[in-house]
Image (cartoon, rainbow, N blue to C red):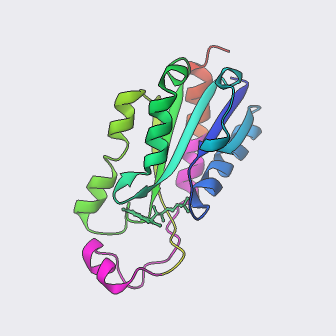
Amino acid sequence: MKKLCITYETVTNTTKEIAEEIGHIAGNRGVIPDVIPLSAVENFDQYDAFVIGAPVHGMRWKTEATEFVKKHRNALKNVPVAYFLDAYMLNNGYHFWQTRIRKCLDPVSKIVKPVKTGMFGGRVPDPLPAPMRLIFGVKKEAPLDVRDENAIRTWAEELITVLSEKSSR
Ligand SMILES: Cc1cc2nc3c(=O)[nH]c(=O)nc-3n(C[C@H](O)[C@H](O)[C@H](O)COP(=O)(O)O)c2cc1C
């Protein structure tokens, strides 16, 4: 694998930062990463593999990411593809919601089958209002940033290995 497109949807840059970390690890492994928003992806043929990341909104992978996969399914089926999500409530709320988040990549995986998926805790800019904490079971003292840097790095390392094995170039 020579060139990897790591593309993301974001609102408050958390997903972008995760994508950049994956890009950093890819770069260390001799891969050329393009870390760009979904809207900036052009000329799919130039890439040997794709990583597509988006936050969870309303307990779904952000719609723009699913639409991106739907729209470009033919190009994406030619190369190895991985998906990741980040969600504040992934490990940080009622079990019911955590289970629901863990199913968020199922619909897109049926459109284009990924070689690997990743799920990471996310970040919110402000504490959740009390009614939302009550609905989702998030503790008042929960930190705003629940990302696990080690989990992201470990996943990225494994990912580069898998993509390199699967990529034909
Ligand atoms: C409008 C909105 C809806 C959200 N809905 C959820 C949700 O349903 N479940 C969840 O775990 N996090 C939810 N979040 C939190 C984000 O998914 C999470 O913090 C993520 O890391 C933000 O990524 P970003 O900075 O790339 O936008 C929501 C955030 C926003 C702004």
Q: Residue at x 53, y 71 (%)?
A: 145
Q: Is residue 4 above or below residue 135?
A: above
Quick check: is 142 in the magenta stretch?
Answer: yes
Q: Position of residue 96 (x, y in %)?
A: 22, 61
Q: Quadrant of residue 1?
A: top right
Number of dots carrying numbers: 0
Question: Looking at the image, which is closer to me, 139 or 71?
Answer: 71
Task: Determine the residue positioned at 51% across, 75% down.
Answer: 144
Q: Position of residue 9 (x, y in %)?
A: 56, 50
Q: Where's residue 132, x and y in %? A: 32, 78
Q: Is residue 23 above or below residue 71?
A: below
Q: Residue furthest top?
A: 168
Q: Residue at x 65, y 25 (%)?
A: 44
Q: Quadrant of the C terminus?
A: top right
Q: Is residue 2 left or right of residue 134?
A: right
**Whole-percent x, y for residue 148 in the image:** 53, 61
Question: Quarter containing ligand 1?
Answer: bottom left
* Camera-side residue of 2 and 151: 2
Residue at the far left in the pictured view: 96
Q: Is residue 141 above or below residue 147?
A: below
7 relative to 136 in the view: left or right:
right
Of residues 54 and 20, the one drawn nearer to the viewer in this rendering: 54
Name the residue: 34% across, 76% down: 138
Q: Which residues are magenta?
A: 127-156
Q: Is residue 117 above or below residue 45?
A: below
